[in-house]
Image: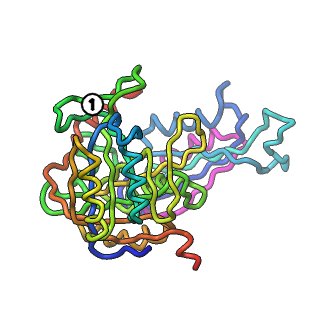
């Protein structure tokens, strides 16, 4: 896996309770990314937010099942990211997908460092 | 007030248990110096030593109250030292007084509360800047310290304008290993993202340090516009004063 220079960053925003085929949507997206050999994906849970539905997502101290805002961040080359887009379009039916340009400074893992 | 230039450094060696009019000698000397307007004095307790009586004073476990050596040190102008010495001579009893010629390079200053110590923030308030994101794992280490913590400390030390750490709940990266948060799992290895905003030059200057610290992970850079970057110094001062 090599990644350097100009790349694209995808940020996908939706709710924690969103699902795809009976599985949390964020997990489904990460699995899809792995399947497509995307360089990496990270899921973040926000503590408060609102989005397309204008419904406020908020995590309460005493509530264990909030529909917290979720952000999945995916970084890879433009063509790899573009391959992912049609799947995302199908999977995310309520949310936001944003793409921005990034410059890769470093992308390493220990296996690569040793070999 | 002590000024830069030639001065005298006085060291007084006494025992911790020595008394002066029923009170401990070193604190009596310190009080004397304080109320005679000396610009500053330090008391240092040694952990072992011996003096004129050739009795070894140590900090042994079997003896909790031992007469440990105490050193009182202060720096003053020669005139002031000459004025105080007779009284000190009378106070120290069996102790030792030593005077050295010294030079004050920079006198200590009284902190001016009205003027903020850091008047210029490390980043301009608006304009073009770079956003750097660093993706690492929660269990990644740098010299036995969590990597994300070590990175924050090193950024602070290198005057980077600011950094925020985000903890992810799921992810995978360069090593293809899935980092997952499970409710009953105590040995987390969650993905961590550090987000840093600063000028391109500052970040570029920091890259070599970052490179040596991050053994596995991803670092990306993107353009941002700074809309606001400010800090309320007066508020901070008020908070400091409120603290006991």
Does the segment drawn in magenta span residue B4? no
Parent chain of label 1: A
Mark 1 is surrounded, within 10 Å at the Cα level, by few (under 14), some (14 to 19) or many (20 or more) other residues, namely: some
Decide: is A58 above or below B30.
above
Decide: is A72 above or below B113.
below
Residue B40, position as x, y percentages in the image: 46, 45
* Residue B143 relative to residue A96: left or right: right
Residue picked out by circle 1: A57
Given residues B183 and A84, the one toward you in this image is A84
Does the image show residue B60?
yes
Rendered residue at 45%/51% (across/down) = B191
Rendered residue at 15%/49% (across/down) = B228
Q: Give the range drawn in magenta.
A: B82-105
Q: Residue furthest right?
A: B62
Q: Residue furthest bottom?
A: A115
Residue A105, position as x, y percentages in the image: 35, 71
Given residues A21 and A103, the one toward you in this image is A21
Quarter of the image with the C terminus of chain B in it? top left
Given residues B100 and B216, the one toward you in this image is B216
Residue B198, position as x, y percentages in the image: 26, 61
* Residue B196 relative to residue A62: left or right: left
Q: Which residue lies furthest to the front in this view?
A: A21
Does the segment drawn in magenta span residue B101? yes
Given residues B50 and A1, the one toward you in this image is A1
Rendered residue at 39%/22% (across/down) = A63
* Picture mark count: 1
Mark 1, secondary structure of its residue: strand
* Residue B214 relative to residue B203: left or right: right
């Amino acid at each position: 896996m090599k990644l350097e220079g100009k790349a694209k960053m995808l940020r996908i925003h939706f709710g924690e309770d969103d699902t795809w085929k009976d599985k949390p949507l964020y997990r489904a997206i990460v699995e899809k990314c792995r399947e497509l050999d995307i360089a990496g994906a990270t899921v973040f849970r926000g503590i408060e937010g609102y989005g397309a539905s204008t419904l406020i997502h908020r995590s309460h101290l005493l509530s264990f099942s909030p529909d917290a805002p979720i952000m999945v961040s995916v970084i890879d080359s433009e063509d790899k990211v573009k391959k992912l887009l049609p799947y995302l379009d199908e999977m995310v039916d309520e949310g936001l997908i944003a793409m921005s340009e990034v410059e890769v400074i470093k992308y390493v893992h220990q296996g690569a460092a040793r070999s | 007030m002590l000024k830069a230039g030639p001065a005298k450094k006085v060291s007084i060696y006494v025992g911790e248990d020595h008394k002066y009019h029923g009170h401990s000698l070193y604190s009596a000397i310190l009080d004397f110096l304080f109320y005679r307007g000396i610009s500053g004095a330090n008391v240092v307790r040694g952990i072992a030593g011996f003096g004129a009586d050739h009795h070894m004073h140590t900090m042994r476990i079997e003896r909790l109250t031992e007469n440990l050596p105490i050193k009182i040190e202060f720096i003053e102008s020669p005139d002031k030292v000459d004025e105080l010495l007779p009284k000190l001579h009378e106070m120290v009893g069996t102790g030792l007084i030593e005077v050295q010629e010294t030079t004050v390079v920079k006198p200590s200053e009284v902190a001016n509360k009205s003027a903020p110590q850091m008047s210029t923030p490390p980043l301009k308030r608006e304009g073009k800047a770079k956003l750097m994101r660093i993706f690492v794992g929660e269990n990644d280490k740098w010299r036995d310290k969590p990597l994300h913590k070590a990175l924050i400390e090193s950024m602070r030390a290198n005057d980077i304008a600011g950094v925020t750490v985000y903890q992810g709940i799921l992810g995978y990266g360069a090593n293809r290993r899935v980092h997952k948060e499970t409710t009953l799992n105590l040995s987390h290895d969650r993905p961590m993202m550090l987000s840093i905003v600063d000028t391109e030059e500052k970040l570029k200057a920091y890259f070599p340090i970052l490179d040596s610290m991050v053994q596995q992970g991803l670092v990306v850079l993107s353009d941002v516009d700074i809309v606001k970057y400010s800090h309320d110094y007066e508020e901070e001062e008020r908070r400091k004063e409120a603290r006991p």
